[in-house]
């Protein structure tokens, strides 16, 4: 029975660390640009045109 208690405590510790990492990443603005890289890869020509128009 003591092994079960240890496993539960370890799993809570691991889950808490994952929750802390997620909260840290949200506070560090890791999820602001949800479309950026995916859209740039698909529409690279349109993206370059927009950049060139902004620079002019």
Image (cartoon, rainbow, N blue to C red):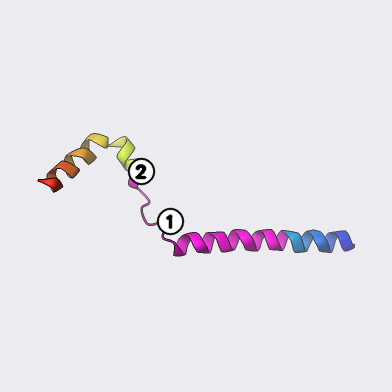
Residue extending furthest toward the front: 55
Q: Residue at x 84, y 60 (%)?
A: 4
Residue range in magenta is 11-37
Residue 26 vs residue 1, the one in the foreground: 26
- Few, some or many C-alpha atoms within 10 Å of disc 1 (few <14, some 14-19, many ≥20)? few
Q: Which callout, 2 or 1, points at the residue further toward the start of the chain?
A: 1
Quadrant where the image shows the N terminus? bottom right
Q: Is residue 33 left or right of residue 25?
A: left
Residue at label 1? Answer: 30
Relative to 55, is 1 above or below? below
Residue 42 drawn above or below residue 4: above
Question: Residue placed farthest to the left in the image?
Answer: 56
Q: Position of residue 39 (x, y in %)?
A: 32, 42
> SS at mark 2?
helix
The question of residue 14 being in magenta is answered with yes
Tags 2 and 1 touching, CB below 8 Å: no
Query: Between marks 2 and 1, how big is the CA–CA gap?
Result: 13 Å
Q: Residues within 10 Å of mark 2 (few under 14, many from 20)?
A: few
Q: Is residue 33 left or right of residue 50?
A: right
Give the residue drawn at x 53%, y 59%: 22
Residue at the image point whose x is 33% and y is 36% from the top: 41
At horizontal 21% and vertical 38% (from top left) the residue drawn is 48
Image quadrant where residue 18 sits: bottom right
Q: Is residue 19 left or right of residue 28?
A: right
Can you tell which mark lies on residue 37? 2
Q: Position of residue 8 (x, y in %)?
A: 77, 62
The percent coordinates of residue 24 (x first, y second) are: 51, 63
Q: Quadrant of residue 28?
A: bottom left
Circle number at residue 55: none
Q: Main secondary structure of the magenta part?
A: helix
Q: Secondary structure at mark 1?
A: loop
């Amino acid at each position: 029975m003591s092994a079960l208690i240890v496993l539960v405590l370890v799993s809570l510790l691991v889950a808490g660390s994952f929750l802390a990492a997620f909260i840290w990443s949200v506070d560090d603005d890791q999820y602001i640009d949800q479309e950026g890289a995916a859209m740039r890869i698909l529409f690279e020509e349109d993206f370059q045109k927009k950049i060139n128009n902004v620079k002019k």
